[in-house]
Each structure stands twice: as structure tokens, then as C-alpha cells.
Amino acid sequence: MELKILENIEIAQNTFSLKIDNPNLFDALAGQFFMVRINGFNYPLLRRPFSIADFNENYIEIIYRVVGEGTKILTKKKAGEFIDILGPLGNGFSDIGTGKKIFLVGGGIGVAPLIYLKNVIESQYRLPYKAYFGFNFKEEIYVDFGEIATMDGSVGFNGNVVDLVEKELDENSIVFACGPTLMLKRLAYVCYDKNCKMQVSLESRMACGIGVCLGCVVETQDGYKKVCDNGPVFDYREIVWQAL
Ligand code: FES
């Protein structure tokens, strides 16, 4: 589907917010993603997956970090141009209203889908929540709520976001998490320890996004599953973390 770009601006170091006109043809769950075709040429050949940072009747927002040729090309797109997107895809976060204590825990570009989840919690569920986000340094931060941890100590807690949130978690907690695999793995071990619930949105290199190429499989207790099709959101107890 070709949709009009409303805005494509840098909001933090190497981090862009892309707002696309929402024609109101579909709805999207927090945690779902879109496959975006970067351009009409042969290179980069494939679509890239981007999680939804906000979604309302006016626009769809994607927040992306510039990590390679494809995303560099994306930064050149201007308001008024059209972009080809496929989605929303994947399963999204669920059971949002079931936890006694809701936590959003994100790292780096993985914070983006938790911004949309926060908006959903506030507008649809009206439940209290706490948010903890980790970045490498101040210039990377693109979120304006939650407690911040930075690896260089330039803002907030000095160190890893998992160390920041760990003491808050207990068996009444439900955690919604997204971020680098190592961060999620550490958080999974903490959650096992504290016996809390957690849903993780896994980041994966996706070529097709629709369950065809098998490029995104992850090992689970139930065999290999496709991140794009069976996920990207999984119960953390499903994932074989030792394999990651
Ligand atoms: Fe192709 Fe998941 S990205 S099967």
C-alpha cells in the first residue's frame, strides 16, 4: 500500500521519526510492525521491518535508527512523497490489563514500540505503569517519559536498564519488553528469578515479514518458530535463551 509521508525528521542522534498518513483502512496493535519498501529500485532489494511507535486516526509513526544503506536511503524521503508499506504484521502485545504492576522495559531503538504501548495503556486501559529505558548515551535518547539508564552515565542511572528495573520486579509484575537480545536475555533471567510475567518483542533480521523465507526463526520450547509470523511478541518462558 502506498501511503503519503507527512514528516521524516531526526529526533536523536541517527534516529528518525517517520510519520505516514493513516487512511484509516486498518487498525494496529502495539507490538505489531510494518514492512517498509525503501525504494523502487533493485537495491536494497527487500522490505525492512519497523515497529510501530504510534498509531492513530491521523498518522502512523515509525522511529528508526540509521544502521545501513537502506535506512540511510529512508532518511532522504520527504514529506509529500509516497512510501510502500505492508502491514500491520505480527501478533502484538496481549493481556495488557491482567498485570497488577505493569512495566515497560526497553533498550535503544527497542523503546519505539513501547511508546505506542504506553499510549494504548493510557487511552484504552487507563492503568498505572512504570517505564524504564536504556540508551548508550544522552544523544541517543528520543523518549520523554520513564526512568532512563545510560551506559556512560550521562543521563539517569549509570549502567544497564536491567540493573535499574530489577529491584522493582516481583511475582505481581507483568513486563513488556523490547530491545537488544542480550538485554532481553538478562531480563529473562531476572524474571525467572522473580517469577514475574513478561512478554518480549524480539528483534530479528526479516527478509519477507510474512512467514515465507524462514530467515527469522528463533528456538522455542516448542521447536523453531518464525519471529515475523508467530511473534514478534513471545512469552519469555517460550524462548530458549541459551541459544541466543
Ligand atoms: Fe521471512 Fe520471517 S522474515 S519467515
Image (cartoon, rainbow, N blue to C red):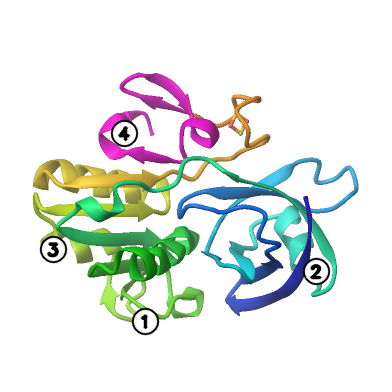
Rounded to the nearest whole Å, what is the CA distance between mark 1 and mark 2? 30 Å
Residue matched to label 3: 168
Rounded to the nearest whole Å, what is the CA distance between mark 1 and mark 3? 22 Å
Across and down, in percent, residue 161 comes to 29, 63
Residue matched to label 2: 76
The residue sitting at 32% across, 77% down in the picture is 153
Closest to the observer: 94 or 232? 94
Which disc is residue 134 wearing? none
The residue sitting at 60% across, 68% down in the picture is 57
Counting residues from the N terminus, which is met first, the one under dot 4 or under dot 3? 3
Residue matched to label 1: 154
Report the mark closest to the observer, 1 or 3.
Answer: 3
Counting residues from the N terminus, which is met first, the one under dot 3 or under dot 2? 2
Rounded to the nearest whole Å, what is the CA distance between mark 3 and mark 2? 42 Å
- Identified by mark 4, the residue type is Trp
Residue matched to label 4: 241
Report the mark closest to the observer, 1 or 2.
Answer: 2
